[in-house]
DNA sequence: TAAGACATTGCAACGATGTTGCAAAATAAG
DNA sequence: CTTATTTTGCAACATCGTTGCAATGTCTTA
């Protein structure tokens, strides 16, 4: 079941604005992940920096996108799966960060393995980030 | 085989200075991970901000400490195991980030599981970060 | 379609974080 | 002890992200 841009925004009870449509479209087109800087450079001077920050924040809160932890400490965002709802993310898939081209992939086929924690530790979320070379940079 | 502070620095061909000794000692004492801010507040006005940044950079390059990717996008550092040498890190253990107290633990017992990658993808490093509640925050 | 209520945007200013160049000070080598 | 090399501290700067507020745009209801 696929939704259009506007439908996705409406479903999350968000007003439909130019910036939100444009930014959400970027995520849909790129099936990788995007950093704030990517969005800012791709959209040129069309939107204010602040607008992009706030739009990303809103999307994360509404469960449309999620953040990806990376070894190089740059925040990246990617589209959530349908299972995610506002305030409750369920993105247990593995992320792959290519050292060559810098692209971040969501490896949906691979799920994060369950790790055994010491006594008294409770897990709410597991992030797996694999770094290496992707199939385009060989 | 355990080395003293000075021996560790010498082994990495680093001059022995007050700031390096003090910062390395912090890592040895805390068996968790430290962020730049932790070090800055713990050492007070003793060292310049810049000195701390450069010292951490140097330690990473020499293979004394390594960075930990976190979901909250704050860079943290932890001591490397003996297997690490300058330019070649081998820290495949799992990290645990407590949402309660913010402490980062290195779970040495647990090793990062091997993940199956799609054809053409090569892995050089795997980071696993588990978030949740630690045994002190229950 | 028009008007009012509400949400979003852009601007400016600010704080936190991290980097660079250069002179002074500390460390290492002879 | 003296000289050469590193390292430190300072200042200035670049980047990243946040906040308050007025102006603009979107939604709702009639």
Image (cartoon, coloured by chain):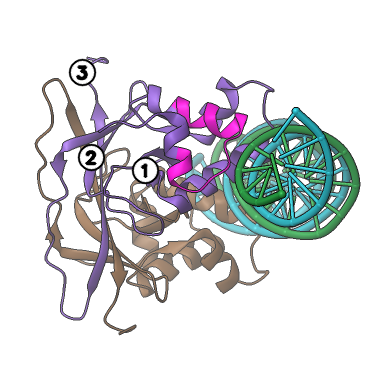
Chain colours: A purple, B brown, C cyan, D green
Q: Which residues are magenta?
A: A9-26
Mark 1 nearby-residue class (10 Å; few <14, some 14–19, many ≥20) = many
Residue A10 forms part of the magenta stretch = yes
Secondary structure beneath dot 1 equals loop
Q: Are marks 2 and 1 in contact (CB under 8 Å)?
A: yes
Query: Can residue A75 be seen here?
Result: no
Q: Nearer the viewer, residue A120 or B44?
A: A120
The residue labelled by disc 3 is A135
Q: Residue at x 47, y 32 (%)?
A: A6
Query: Which numbered circle lies on residue B125?
Result: 2
Residue B122 forms part of the magenta stretch = no
The residue labelled by disc 1 is A71
Q: Position of residue B122 (x, y in %)?
A: 17, 27
Q: CA gap, disc 2 to disc 1?
A: 10 Å
Q: CA gap, disc 3 to disc 2?
A: 16 Å
Above or below, B123 against D17 in this view is above
Q: Position of residue B11 (x, y in %)?
A: 33, 51
Query: Can residue A133 be seen here?
Result: yes
Secondary structure beneath dot 3 equals loop
Q: Residue at x 36, y 26 (%)?
A: A103
Same chain for the residues under marks 3 and 2 in the image? no
Q: Main secondary structure of the magenta part?
A: helix
Q: Nearer the viewer, residue B131 or A27?
A: A27
Q: Position of residue A77 (x, y in %)?
A: 42, 39
Image quarter hosting the N terminus of chain A:
top left
Q: Chain of mark 1?
A: A
Q: Residue at x 39, y 56 (%)?
A: B9
Mark 2 nearby-residue class (10 Å; few <14, some 14–19, many ≥20) = some
Mark 3 nearby-residue class (10 Å; few <14, some 14–19, many ≥20) = few
Q: Nearer the viewer, mark 3 or mark 2?
A: 3
Above or below, A122 against A46 in this view is below
Q: Position of residue B81 (x, y in %)?
A: 23, 56
């Amino acid at each position: 079941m696929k939704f259009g841009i506007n439908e996705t925004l409406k479903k999350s009870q968000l007003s439909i604005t130019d910036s939100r449509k444009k930014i959400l479209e970027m995520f849909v087109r790129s099936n990788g992940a995007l950093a704030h800087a990517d969005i800012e450079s791709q959209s040129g001077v069309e939107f204010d920096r602040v607008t992009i920050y706030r739009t990303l924040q809103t999307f994360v809160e509404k469960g449309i996108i999620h953040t990806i932890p990376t070894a190089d400490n740059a925040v990246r965002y990617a589209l959530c799966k349908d299972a995610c709802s506002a305030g409750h993310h369920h993105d247990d898939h593995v992320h792959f960060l290519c050292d060559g081209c810098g692209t971040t992939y969501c490896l949906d086929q691979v799920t994060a393995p369950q790790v055994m924690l010491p006594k008294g530790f409770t897990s709410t979320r597991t992030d797996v980030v694999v770094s290496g070379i992707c199939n385009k940079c060989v």
